[in-house]
C-alpha cells in the first residue's frame, strides 16, 4: 500500500515518535504565523525564553483581528508586535495588509512544508499542499525557539472527490456537506486528505475554503495535492519557484474513507448556531434577511468578490439588507480596485470594509436584535457576531449575494442569472510594501510596550491534592468563544490577563470570575467536544489565572486540550461518561495524591463530598505532558529542562 500525502510530509519532518494513530509524535516546524489577538501573548512567551532570533525558516506576525482602534490598546499592541518582529527576525504584516491566512497563501505558503499558526484556521494553507496546523500561542513560541511540535498522530481520512461541481455549487458547499455528514466533532484526531478526479475540477480558492473550514470539523488539518493548478496560482503570485508536485502514492493507506460526488451537491447553508447545522438552501428559502457579509479567511478571495460583483451588476442591495464586503487582503483590494469590481460593488450599495477579520470576530457590524445575518464566514456560534439573539447563517458568496439582492434566503439557481465563471488572473498584483522584512541589524531595536501590555503571570506547580468546587457545569460542544469571548470590547484585552480574566465564561455566568476569585481554586465540568473552535490560549490562560485547576468532561477538542496542558490545568475525562450526571454545579470535589498517581500512572478518583461517593477519572497524558501539567505549565517545564 502507498502512503498518503499527509504521511509523506510528516515523515520528512518527524523528530520523534511512531506514525501510528494515537501515538505522540514530534515534527519540525518550517514556518510559523501569528495574528495580533493571539500574537502578543505568543511573543511575550517567546521573549521569556531568552532566545536571540527565531529558528524557523520563516515566521510571520500578522495584524488583522484587533483593528478597531476604539482606544489606545490595539494600536499599542500593533507597535509592540512590530518592534518584537524586527528584533527577533520575524516578518511583520502591517494592519491593512489583510487576513493572515489569505496573505500567507499569497506570499509565503509552500507545498510540502510545515506551518504552525496561533489561529485555528491555519489549515487554510493545506490548499497549497502544506501541512498547516493551528495551535495555542505557546506552542508557536516554542516552535519559533526551534522546538518541535508535539501532537498525537492523527488518523488520515481520504476524501475521494468524484465528478464536477455544478453551476452555483462551490467549495463552500463541499465543506458544508462534510460538516453535515461528520458534525463539528467528526474530524477530531484526524487529518482530512482530499484526492481524486474531483480535486482537479475545483478552483484553487475552493481548495482553500475547504481546508480552511476543516477547522470546524475539529480536524488537525486538511490537505490537498500540489498540482498544475497550485503551480499556476504560485506563478500568478510570482512564486513559481517554490512549487513542487506533491500527491499521495497510488492506493494510499487511508485509515478511513469518504466519497463525495460533486455532481450531486446543491447549494447548502449552515443554520444557527453551529456550522454543522446544515440544510439545502432550497429547504429554507424565503426567510427574511437583515444583513449579508462576504469576507473572512474562508471566502474573501479575488474570486469570491468577483462573483459577488458579477451577480450585483446592474442590481442593488435590497432595502432591508445591509451588505458588507471585505477583500481578504490588500492584494485582493488592489485587484478589485483596478479592474472595476470595486466600482460595481459600491454602485450596488454594498458597504466595503478594510482587509481584516472584522465582523467575523465581532469587531463591529453586530446585526440588529433577533435578526438574520447570512455570512460567507466559518463560525456562527451564538453571540459571536456581537448580538446575543442574532441568527447567523453560513453559506457561499453566491448564496450570500443572492440573499442580498432579494432580501430573503435565496437559492442562487432561482435568480435567473446565467452561471458565472471567473477566470483566474494570470498575474496578481504583487506589492509587498505592507510586509516589513526583519532588518539585518537588530542591536538598537527597543521593544515598545504600552500600559495595557502586562507581564505574563507566573504559575505554581500542581498541588498534591485538588480540593475545589465545581463552579460551572456545562453541556456538549462548548466553544472557546463561550469560555473566553472575543468581540470589540474584550479582544483589546488579550495582552492583559488580569483584565481579560474578568470576562471568563461571561456569556454563561457573568459572576464566574468573581466566584472563582473568592473560591481561590475551582473545577469546571463539561460534556463532549469541550473547547471546540478558536485556538485562543486565553481560554486556558485566563481561567488558570482565576484558579481553575481541573476540567472534567466527556471529551475535549484538540487545540483546547493542548492549551489546558500548556497552562498546567489538569484535563480529565469521565471513565464512565454517565458519571457526568452524578456531579452538580456547586459540588465540592476532592482528588487526592494527584502528583503521585499521575507520575505512577495510577487511577485518579474524585470524591464528591456531598454524597461521599467516588468517580473514576481518565487522563491521557504522554510522559512529557504529565511533566508539563505537574510543573504548572509548559513555560515552567521548558525553563526547568533548559537549565
Ligand atoms: C476565531 O476565528 O475565533 C479567531 C479569533 O481567529 C481565533 C483566534 C483568536 O481567538 O484569537 C481562532 O480561530 O483561533
Ligand atoms: Fe479572522 Fe474570522 Fe478567520 Fe478567525 S475565522 S482568522 S476571526 S477571519
Image (cartoon, grey):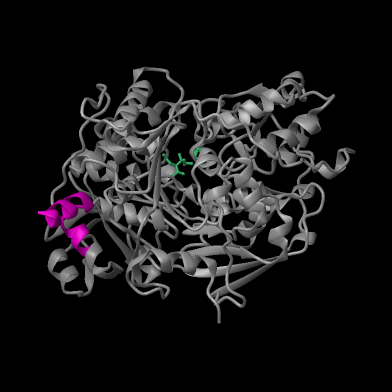
- Give the answer, above or below, for where 331 lies relative to 640: above
- The N terminus, quarter of image: bottom right
- The picture quadrant where one finds residue 18 is bottom left
The majority secondary structure of the magenta stretch comes to helix
Q: Looking at the image, which is closer to me, 236 or 331?
A: 236
Please state if 61 lies on the left or on the right of 455 as rendered.
right
- Magenta segment range? 626-643
- The C terminus, quarter of image: bottom left
- The picture quadrant where one finds residue 344 is top right
- Would residue 270 be visible to someone looking at this image? no
Q: Position of residue 460 (x, y in %)?
A: 13, 49
Residue in the image at 55% along x and 49% along y: 241
Q: Position of residue 136 (x, y in %)?
A: 35, 48
Q: Looking at the image, which is closer to me, 418 or 369?
A: 418
Please state if 539 lies on the left or on the right of 442 as rendered.
right
> In the current view of this chain or complex, which residue is farthest to the left?
643
- Give the answer, above or below, for where 233 lies relative to 196: above
- Give the answer, above or below, for where 595 lies relative to 458: below
Taking the magenta stretch, the answer to whether it contains residue 514 is no
Q: Looking at the image, which is closer to me, 478 or 250?
A: 250
> In the current view of this chain or complex, which residue is farthest to the bottom?
1
Amino acid at each position: 500500500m502507498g502512503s498518503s500525502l499527509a504521511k509523506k510530509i510528516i515523515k520528512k519532518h518527524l523528530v520523534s515518535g511512531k506514525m501510528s494513530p494515537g501515538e505522540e509524535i514530534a515534527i519540525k516546524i518550517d514556518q510559523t504565523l501569528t495574528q495580533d489577538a493571539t500574537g502578543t501573548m505568543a511573543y511575550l512567551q517567546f521573549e521569556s525564553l531568552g532566545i536571540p532570533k527565531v529558528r524557523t525558516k520563516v515566521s510571520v506576525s500578522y495584524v488583522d483581528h484587533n483593528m478597531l482602534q476604539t482606544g489606545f490598546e490595539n494600536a499599542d499592541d500593533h507597535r509592540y508586535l512590530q518592534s518584537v518582529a524586527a528584533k527577533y527576525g520575524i516578518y511583520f504584516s502591517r494592519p491593512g495588509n489583510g487576513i493572515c491566512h489569505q496573505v500567507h497563501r499569497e506570499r509565503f505558503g509552500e507545498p510540502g512544508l510545515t506551518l504552525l499558526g496561533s489561529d485555528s484556521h491555519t489549515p487554510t494553507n493545506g490548499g497549497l499542499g502544506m501541512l498547516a496546523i493551528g495551535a495555542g500561542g505557546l506552542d508557536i513560541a516554542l516552535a519559533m525557539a526551534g522546538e518541535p511540535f508535539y501532537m498525537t498522530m492523527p488518523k488520515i481520512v481520504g476524501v475521494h472527490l468524484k465528478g464536477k461541481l455544478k453551476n452555483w455549487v462551490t467549495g463552500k458547499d463541499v465543506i458544508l456537506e462534510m460538516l453535515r455528514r461528520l458534525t463539528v466533532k467528526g474530524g477530531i484526531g484526524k487529518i482530512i486528505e482530499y484526492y481524486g478526479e474531483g480535486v482537479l475540477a475545483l478552483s484553487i480558492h475552493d481548495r482553500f475554503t475547504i481546508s480552511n473550514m476543516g477547522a470546524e470539523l475539529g480536524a488537525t488539518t486538511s490537505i490537498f495535492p500540489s498540482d498544475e493548478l497550485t503551480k499556476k496560482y504560485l506563478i500568478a503570485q510570482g512564486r513559481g519557484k517554490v512549487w513542487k508536485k506533491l500527491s499521495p502514492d497510488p492506493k494510499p493507506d487511508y485509515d478511513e474513507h469518504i466519497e463525495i460526488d460533486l455532481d450531486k451537491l446543491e447549494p447548502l447553508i449552515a443554520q444557527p448556531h453551529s456550522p454543522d447545522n446544515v440544510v439545502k438552501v432550497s429547504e429554507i428559502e424565503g426567510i427574511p434577511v437583515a444583513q449579508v457579509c462576504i469576507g473572512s479567511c474562508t471566502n474573501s478571495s479575488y474570486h469570491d468578490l468577483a462573483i459577488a460583483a458579477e451577480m450585483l451588476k446592474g442590481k442593488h442591495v435590497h432595502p432591508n439588507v445591509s451588505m458588507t464586503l471585505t477583500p481578504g487582503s490588500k492584494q485582493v483590494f488592489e485587484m478589485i480596485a483596478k479592474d472595476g469590481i470595486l466600482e460595481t460593488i459600491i454602485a450596488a450599495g454594498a458597504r466595503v470594509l478594510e482587509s481584516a477579520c472584522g465582523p467575523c470576530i465581532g469587531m463591529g457590524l453586530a446585526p440588529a436584535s433577533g435578526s438574520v445575518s447570512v455570512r460567507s464566514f466559518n463560525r456562527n456560534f451564538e453571540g459571536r457576531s456581537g448580538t446575543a439573539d442574532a441568527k447567523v447563517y453560513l453559506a457561499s458568496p453566491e448564496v450570500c449575494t443572492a440573499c442580498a439582492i432579494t432580501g430573503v434566503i435565496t437559492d442562487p439557481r432561482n435568480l435567473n442569472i446565467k452561471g458565472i465563471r471567473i477566470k483566474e488572473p494570470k498575474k496578481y498584483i504583487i506589492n509587498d510594501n505592507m510586509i516589513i522584512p526583519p532588518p539585518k541589524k537588530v542591536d538598537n531595536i527597543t521593544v515598545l510596550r504600552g500600559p495595557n501590555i502586562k507581564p505574563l503571570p507566573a504559575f505554581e506547580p500542581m498541588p498534591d491534592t485538588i480540593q475545589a468546587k465545581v463552579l460551572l457545569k456545562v453541556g456538549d460542544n462548548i466553544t472557546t468563544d463561550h469560555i473566553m469571548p472575543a468581540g470589540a470590547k474584550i479582544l483589546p484585552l488579550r495582552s492583559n490577563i488580569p483584565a481579560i480574566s474578568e470576562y471568563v465564561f461571561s456569556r454563561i455566568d457573568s459572576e464566574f470570575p468573581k466566584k472563582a476569585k473568592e473560591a481561590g481554586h475551582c473545577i469546571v465540568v463539561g460534556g463532549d467536544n469541550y473547547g471546540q473552535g478558536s485556538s485562543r490560549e486565553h481560554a486556558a490562560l485566563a481561567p488558570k489565572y482565576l484558579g481553575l485547576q481541573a476540567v472534567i468532561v466527556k471529551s475535549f477538542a484538540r487545540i483546547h486540550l493542548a492549551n489546558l496542558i500548556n497552562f498546567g490545568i489538569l484535563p480529565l475525562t469521565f471513565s464512565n461518561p454517565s458519571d457526568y450526571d452524578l456531579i452538580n454545579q456547586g459540588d465540592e470535589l476532592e482528588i487526592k495524591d494527584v502528583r503521585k498517581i499521575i507520575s505512577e500512572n495510577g487511577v485518579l478518583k474524585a470524591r464528591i463530598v456531598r454524597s461521599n461517593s467516588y468517580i473514576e477519572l481518565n487522563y491521557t497524558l504522554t510522559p512529557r505532558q504529565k511533566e508539563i501539567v505537574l510543573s504548572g505549565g509548559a513555560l515552567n517545564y521548558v525553563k526547568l529542562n533548559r537549565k
